[in-house]
Image (spheres, grey):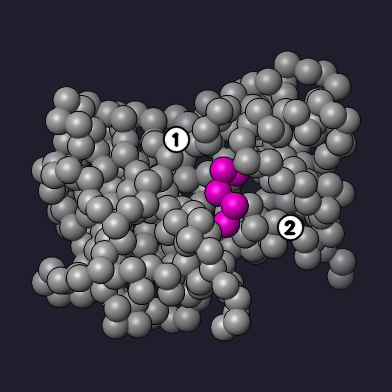
Amino acid sequence: MKALVIDDSRVMRKIVSSALAPLGFEVVEASDGKEALDILASGVEVDLCCIDWNMPVMTGYEFVVEVRKNSYWRDITLMMVTTEGQHSQIVKALAAGAHEYLIKPFTPDAVKSKLQLLGLFVEEV
Amino acid sequence: MTVSLVEPSLDEAVFDDTVFFIAQEVFSAMIDPSDGALSLGSGSPVFSDVTFAWVDMLSTPRRRVMLSTERVTAFSVARALLAAGPDDNVSEADFEDAVGEIANVVGGNVKALVSDPGPLTIPKVSSVPPLDGVLLRQMHLLWHDRSLLISFWSYDESSGC
């Protein structure tokens, strides 16, 4: 599994990546939505995008809208990872095509739970 | 984390309880999971070498959530957030990124409690405070006996704060 972590904060990218790595994800990072789109357009194939909302250049919401315009990327799971906890924002992101929504702060267990819900991680018994 | 999406007023008790809850969540999830690491302080702390980190809500009027603390404390918080070991160097860029992200997470969660907050800005970090607005509420927190102040401000866009 490969994940694209999109956040303008290098610290937050590191934290999200650290939560994903033990779950078996190879991680690619981007610092805004535009850079993330460029990575996808270059042919890098990912299973999951973890997307911050507020970023310079291109927001996470704009990134979700752009990804959903391209049918080639329809199988990518999009999870917002953001401080934007307003109900209206959550609804807006999900309506645009995001699959899940994780509000910062979060624990590694919360990331794992979301990925289990999305079917991207199965805990071995 | 779970934060009630109820708004609306700046009822002081509700605001204080909620902000303290948010701060505890931020610290326990991202910085220091030890029990009781964060507690309420009394009075207003006096800082000498201060780091300010804030995010603004582009509402009318503007609102601001700001974290203030001694620079040495901010560095300790940043090191904890980065999981930096004793020998690890933390660059100024990483320091500002880490402290700004804490303000961003606190501010973003406070935003969920406010009516018509507008978009949230990218966090700013400085040793110089932004120009004065109207202080609405502030909360003095203690992290291992070191003071942090979370404050909530209102200002007019035209004031240039």
Q: Split into 4 quadrants, where in the image is the C terminus of chain A?
A: bottom right
Dot 1 falls on which chain?
A
Q: Nearer the viewer, residue A51 or B156?
A: B156
Q: Is residue B122 magenta?
A: no
Q: Are marks 1 and 2 in contact (CB under 8 Å)?
A: no
Residue A39 sits above or below residue B152 on the image: above
Q: Position of residue A64 (x, y in %)?
A: 65, 27
Q: Position of residue A121 (x, y in %)?
A: 81, 54
Q: Secondary structure at mark 1?
A: helix
Left or right, residue B123 beside residue A123 = left
What residue is drawn where x is 26% and y is 43%? Answer: B64
Q: Position of residue B114 (x, y in %)?
A: 28, 39
Give me the C-alpha separation between circle 1 and circle 2.
Answer: 26 Å
- Name the residue tied to disc 2: A20
Q: Nearer the viewer, residue A107 or B11?
A: A107
Res A124 quadrant in image: bottom right
Left or right, residue B39 beside residue A110 = left
- Name the residue tied to disc 1: A87
Amino acid on which disc 2 is placed: Leu
Q: Most prominent secondary structure in the magenta stretch?
A: loop
The reply to whether residue A32 is visible in this rendering is yes
Dot 2 falls on which chain?
A
Instruction: Please report the bounds of the magenta region as a residue range.
Output: A7-11
Q: Nearer the viewer, residue A64 or B85?
A: B85
Q: Position of residue A25 (x, y in %)?
A: 82, 55
The reply to whether residue B17 is visible in this rendering is no
Left or right, residue B134 beside residue A75 = left
Q: Is residue A8 magenta?
A: yes
Closer to viewer: mark 1 or mark 2: 2
What residue is drawn where x is 63% and y is 31%? Answer: A33
Residue A80 sits above or below residue A23 on the image: above
